[in-house]
Amino acid sequence: MTPAPGSPHLGQFKKEMAKHQRYSIIPLSPKGERYFDLAIGKKEVLFRQSLEITGNDLDAVVFPEHCFDGEKSVH
């Protein structure tokens, strides 16, 4: 996630996460319909900078394979 400059959304998410200690991932249809019955509850989130992630990191799956040069960070 790369929020637009001045966007309050990431800060608000962090604030709510600290308060409630949980969040849900809820699928949406292409028309924006929410499927709450398919929600996945989560209790942990890691906030990381992309440069901290290497090719062998579990979080590397969110990047295209060509973003890594061996074991180095995203480039």
Image (spheres, rainbow, N blue to C red):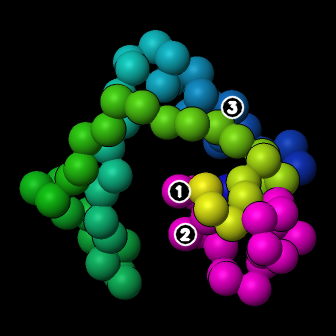
Of residues 69 and 74, which is closer to you in this image? 69
Q: How far apart are marks 2 and 3 (CA)?
A: 24 Å
For label 1, the residue is 58
Q: Nearer the viewer, residue 70 or 13?
A: 70
* Quarter of the picture holding the C terminus: bottom right
Q: Can you say whether 27 is above or below 4 in the image? A: below
Asked whether 61 falls inside the magenta stretch, the response is: yes
Residue 2 shows in this picture: no
User: Label 2 amino acid?
Assistant: Val
Asked which secondary structure carries label 3, the reply is helix
Is tag 2's residue or tag 3's residue first in the polypeptide sequence?
A: 3
Q: Nearer the viewer, residue 2 or 33?
A: 2
Q: Name the residue under label 2.
A: 61
What amino acid does circle 1 point to? Answer: Leu
Q: What stretch is highlighted in magenta?
A: 58-75
Q: Can residue 37 be seen in this view?
A: yes
Q: Mark 1 touching mark 2, by CB under 8 A?
A: yes
Residue 17 forms part of the magenta stretch: no
Position of residue 70 in the picture relative to residue 33 (left or right) = right
